[in-house]
Image (cartoon, rainbow, N blue to C red):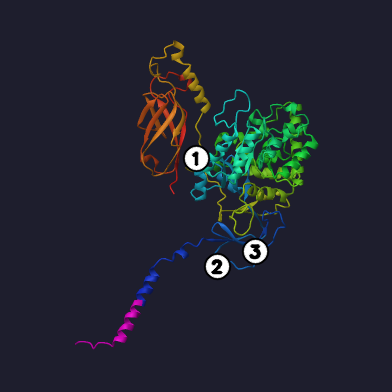
Amino acid sequence: MRTKSLPWEVRVQRIIGRAFVVIACLLALAPPAPSQQSQPPVLVIEGGTLIDGNGGVPVSDALIVIRGNKIETVSRKGQAYPAGAQVIRADGKFILPGLWDSHCHYQWWMPELLLSYGVTSVSLAPADSWGVATREAIERGKIPGPRLFLQPTSIRAPWRPGLVQNDPVIDTPEKAREAVRQSLASKPANISLARGVSFEVYQAAIEEAHKAGLPAVAQAIGPMVYAKEAVLAGLDHIEHAGGVSYSIVKDPSQWKGWGEVEEHSLDPSPYADMDEQKAGELIQLLIAHKTSLEPDLIAHGRGFFQRRAEYELQDYRLYSDHRLAYVPEDRKEKELSTYREFDDLPPAERDRRNLAFQNMKRFMKRFVDAGGKLLTGTDTSSWSVPGIGLHHEFDILVNEVGLTPMQVIVAATRNPAEVWRVLDRQGTIEAGKLADLVIVNQDPLQDIRNLQKIEWVVKDGKPVDRSYHPWFNPPLKNAYFGSQDWVAALKQRTLQGIRPATGLTDVGPVWHFGQPTPGIESISPRIVTEGGSSFTLTLKGVNFTNKSLVYFDSQPLPTRMVSESELQATVDSGLIGRPGTISILVINSGVAQQPQWGGGNSNAATLLVNFRY
């Protein structure tokens, strides 16, 4: 039997009702709106005493709200904060900005050592392909590490007659300007000058750096420009306080040639001849021109510290941790041996060097007391253990130089951010800045060594895992071409080899007399992206033959000899499926013509396979 039809008004209402049910179901099943999905996580630090890095009076019972990687608000405990936030209870503790090592020759194995000791930023990472790739990988969260402030190759020229340098010789203002412009592609933190260049080159490079919004830094150790001349040229910052000692000696003629050897950049000896009036005049000049200093006392005074035994024991205990077995042995040995470097000096020489170090410390105290800006650094990884070495520098500055803990904290946080021109986004704990913080258990203003008593480190808004991991093995490593001096010597020896010796200059390829030892001078490309297409790898060097094979991490590649100085090898896409640092080697198979040079194996080059973003 047919049902009587309902009135049209009822039917419309039922249709609308069913539609609302369907829509409600669809909304329930639908994913959250993009705005809900993209809300960054919130981290709250509740309680504790805030030492914000500006040098003012600490604030008790702080409340810091971090959203994503930025500080959203800084207020007092008791204020409301977002529900569901991750909360760090910091009552009874002390909160500071992340620490900064302003002279760190960054290496792939340093991240855990630096971060565990609260070092969240470092300056002087190399602005090469590895440095640029590593900076991006850290910023994108692919690998752990502090913020990297890159420095390009220094502008330099030969600083003594007959000296040959691998880097381009920059000996005119025009070359200096062009060198600065070319370096901008890597987005460096500064422009660096080194030995051998003139006052005019300094001026040109500094002017070009300032046009790009970058500070200019230098180790001003001559032979034409020392600290005083560098300041007058407009320099922003002096690394190692290099050249200061020469500029304040009583008799410069007694120090002629100072700076001609590398070690002089960290040799305080001229301070033993310090002229007090010249020291005062240079301090006033530095302050008038707003030029900052980074003294690296841990490097200058190795072995002369009042707490040498304590520092040395800390270093040994740290490197005895089996979880740090991945740290290269040669670096451990170098860093641990610095304490004993001057123990065997003749007494008079040792006393003179110690006097120089004491005078250097007095100079730094006068500089800061007069209003000078100091930065903290270590020159690791040569003269101190990464991370803990910076804390030793802090202790020297307080315990031996006589600075206050607050002055040292500012030198390790606000000052480097200001000098590197990033104070608008880091260096202090303020709303709107990047969330890099250190939380310690005891008051560092009472004892600077309390900065080592770290409870939490926050980097980029996230708590850091401060433990060491024996399996730590980042894919990108700054392995450089091995033995370039060896390659140059091999090349020279080859030119003096069997052809010139016999007068047979037209007898054909060198391998007619046995396989020579190959050497790699360069490869192209130096860096590729994971998952990329197959490509041709070009090697330039010496002693390549028709029996040369290029090896990619021990795997032979199809190789074509272009000439005795060039090879081309095909790298299949399957070999670059993931990021890594690949060893590139050339092997000449057959009877070795030059066994005394190592037989048929070349030095190693490296190819970086970068992350794909």
Query: Where residue 380 sits in the image (x, y, percent)?
Result: 61, 39
Three-letter amino acid code of the residue under disc 3: Ser
Please state which of residues 207 and 327 is positioned toward the viewer in this rendering: 207
N-terminal label among 3 and 2? 3
**Category of crowding for the residue at label 1, using alpha-carbon neighbours closer than 10 angstroms: few (below 14), some (14–19), many (at least 20):** some
Which-is-in-front pick, marks 3 and 2? 3
| Disc ID at residue 129 | 1
Three-letter amino acid code of the residue under disc 1: Ser
Q: Which residues are magenta?
A: 1-19
Three-letter amino acid code of the residue under disc 2: Ala
Work out how far the residue at label 2 is from the one at label 1, CA to CA, in angstroms.
Answer: 43 Å
Q: Mark 2 — residue?
A: 83
- Verify CB contact (< 8 Å) between mark 1 and mark 3: no
Where is 6 relative to 537, above or below? below
For the point 57% across and 30% down, the residue is: 169
For the point 76% across and 36% down, the residue is: 359
